[in-house]
């Protein structure tokens, strides 16, 4: 369990405040939020995060970015240990982050690319150095981290719209995609009838809410198949919200032109070739 603080007073475009690796996260309540941008990811266990009326869980291979001064609380699931890594940062250029990342108060990253997931572990030593050249490297690394967030959102097809109702549906899907979701569920989120909700969503997003949900689940499944070899195909199916394995395989093949098993074999062959 490691943590480093930055005591430099120099003005940099990006400057980290503190960084933690394999940190045992206990209950935290910040009614005034945190004064810096705050990234938190789960390494082991499960954590709960609450922001206003929003409540969600942060599982392994998932991350969370929050703007400064947003009230929140977080705590481990039951009595189990919640092992995390985190990075907080500020800087003269951080005002542009919200636009660049399309960030409201916070953003969930539900499937971390390996480069993003391993960023803190791979660069922790550089962040622990206190000399001037290292401080420049640290500023560059924070910028790289922000670009990795953008890349991760793009690769996982994170989608935003100009309509708050549609954004609420997308956010609900991103948080609850593991659970049973119906058109009735999403109409309650939108506050409209089922037909009107479907029409509003399709007019802007280009597909129905259930089509969007299905594609989102399949993208999450592909990430698990590619990077979580210890999970069986049936476990992957259940983790992304499919309760019927045959239907999951059918939908996966229709979307990717490969069955999940074929996808995994191709990935294994590529790893062995390297």
Image (spheres, grey):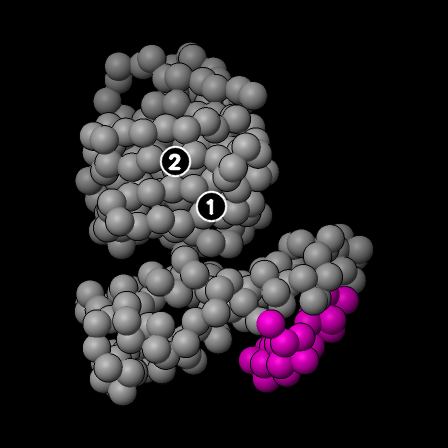
The x and y percentages for residue 96 are: 22, 44
- Tag 2 secondary structure: strand
Q: Is residue 88 visible?
A: yes
- Tag 1 secondary structure: strand
* Range drawn in magenta: 243-265
Q: Is residue 205 left or right of residue 266?
A: left
Q: Which residue is mark 2?
A: 74
Judging depth in this view, the residue of 211 and 179 nearest the camera is 179
The question of residue 134 being in magenta is answered with no
Q: Which residue is mark 1?
A: 58
- Magenta span: chief secondary structure: helix
Judging depth in this view, the residue of 249 and 9 nearest the camera is 249
Which residue is located at x 43 percent, y 42 percent?
48
The question of residue 260 being in magenta is answered with yes
Which residue is located at x 20 percent, y 65 percent?
164
Judging depth in this view, the residue of 16 and 227 nearest the camera is 227
Dots 2 and 1: beta carbons under 8 Å?
A: yes
The x and y percentages for residue 154 are: 41, 60
The x and y percentages for residue 75 are: 43, 34
């Amino acid at each position: 369990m490691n943590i480093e603080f930055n005591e430099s007073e120099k003005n940099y475009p990006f400057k980290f405040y503190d960084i933690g690796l394999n940190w045992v996260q206990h209950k935290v309540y910040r009614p005034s939020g945190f004064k810096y941008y705050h990234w938190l990811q789960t390494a082991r266990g499960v954590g709960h995060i609450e922001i206003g009326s929003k409540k969600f869980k942060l599982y392994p291979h998932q991350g969370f970015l929050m703007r400064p001064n947003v009230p929140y609380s977080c705590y481990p699931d039951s009595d189990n240990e919640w092992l995390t890594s985190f990075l907080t940062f500020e800087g003269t250029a951080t005002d542009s982050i919200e636009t660049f990342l399309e960030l409201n108060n916070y953003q969930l990253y539900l499937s971390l690319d390996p480069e993003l997931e391993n960023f803190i572990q791979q660069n922790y030593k550089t962040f622990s150095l206190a000399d001037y050249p290292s401080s420049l490297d640290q500023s560059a690394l924070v910028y790289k981290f922000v670009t990795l967030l953008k890349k991760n959102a793009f690769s996982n097809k994170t989608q935003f719209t100009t309509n708050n109702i549609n954004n609420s549906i997308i956010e609900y899907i991103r948080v609850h995609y593991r659970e049973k979701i119906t058109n009735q569920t999403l109409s309650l989120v939108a506050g409209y009838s089922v037909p009107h909700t479907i029409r509003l969503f399709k007019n802007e997003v280009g597909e129905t809410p259930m089509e969007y949900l299905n594609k989102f689940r399949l993208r999450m499944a592909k990430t698990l198949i590619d990077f979580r070899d210890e999970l069986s195909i049936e476990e992957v199916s259940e983790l992304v919200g499919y309760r019927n394995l045959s239907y999951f395989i059918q939908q996966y093949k229709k979307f990717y032109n490969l069955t999940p098993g074929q996808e995994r074999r191709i990935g294994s062959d590529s790893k062995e070739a390297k």
